[in-house]
Amino acid sequence: MSIYVTKPFLPPIEEFNRYTQDIFLRDILTNQGPCVVEFENKMKEFLSVKNFQYVTNGTIALQLALKVLDIDEGEIITTPFSYVATTSSILWERCKPIFVDIEPNNFTIDVNKIEAAITPKTKAIMPVHVFGYACDVDAIQKIAEKHNLKVIYDAAHAFGSSYKGRALASYGDVSTLSFHATKLFHTIEGGACICHNDIIDKKLDLIKRFGHLGDDYQYLGINGKQTEFNAAMGLAIYPYIKQIMEKRKKISELYDSFLGGYVQHPQKQKDLEYNYAYYPAVFESEKELLSVFSSLEQADIYPRRYFYPSLNKLPYLKDVSSCPISEDISTRIACLPLYPDLSYEDVKKICNIILSTISRHRETAC
Ligand SMILES: *Cc1c(COP(=O)(O)O)cnc(C)c1O
């Protein structure tokens, strides 16, 4: 059987059906129904946050975050090393992404380079806790306060990580999550906005459902409402979150034990409780990565190039600055298969193929 970079987790079907049977009995399918409310409450508890707005996906969550903070023009400082949605949501909201290079140890935005990118047009900073590793949230907060900027974290990878004793997905003015099927915890499609300010949260709650309460039209809104069936999937998977993370941890440690010293892997910050969302591996060169990919493909194994290209290289962007570290890393990084029921034998097989390919490659290289 083919092995892909990830495989969505599915709960036992009876447990999902218990929720869907109730949905059929109630005849309430959307518009902040009981499953959505229960899901939001469970998430508040799990993440220890006061506010949690469940929405249709992680991209609309980013766009709602920009809208709720009244950022509708100007420059947003962001990272080039992420999924395209981080940049595209900025562009979609008619703002200009300003790319600041990443630091080489865990691939998050380099806080020492942020201030040089600030101009009178800068409105916000949008960093990413990439692969579930923590940005330097304290340094970013200081810079934001000094220059009167908003901070929106794209925390799509951060669910389940905690940093300095607090959910990693709870920092900044707004943090956004994605519950897409490929993420560590999913609701098929889904996303969320998390903020601490109750006024901002109230406004989010309105603008995600067209901006009105009955006949009272308060804000320009959009449709970001999530359905009962998506919430039901989240509720059915919820009891398995800890187990999912533990299994991913075991598999990641197995990868470490086979590949340690041969491929580069991000360094965990000391105050981080990591969620094991991804297993990124950096090869010596793009050529080496491509030979590893072709060897794995022959065994029907398909890792993914996360993230490539570096987002400052997107073809529809004009006059962007160069980001040498992100551009270099993105050409030679891949995420290896990682999901709870990936077997010990499969991990071993993947690692053997990788090791034999790179040893062949490194021999011929010198
Ligand atoms: C998945 C992802 C998104 C988008 O989330 P969707 O729910 O797919 O819209 C945004 N940012 C990052 C970093 C992601 O990985």
Image: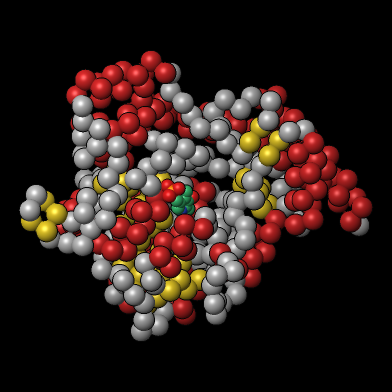
Q: Camera-side residue: 55 or 274?
A: 55
Q: Quadrant of the N terminus?
A: top right
Report x, y in % for residue 183.
48, 40
Report x, y in % for residue 185.
43, 36
Report x, y in % for residue 311.
56, 64
- Is 328 placed above or below 49 here? below
Q: Quadrant of the C terminus?
A: bottom right
- Is 4 placed above or below 307 here? above
For the point 59% across and 55% down, the residue is 307
Res. 210 image quadrant: bottom left
Horizontal side of 138 relative to 70 (left or right) equals right
The residue furthest bottom is: 120
Which scheme is used to colour this image of the protein? secondary structure
Res. 189 image quadrant: top left
One can see residue 141 in this view: no
One can see residue 315 in this view: yes
For the point 61% across and 39% down, the residue is 5
- Is 32 placed above or below 122 here? above
Horizontal side of 69 relative to 103 (left or right) equals left
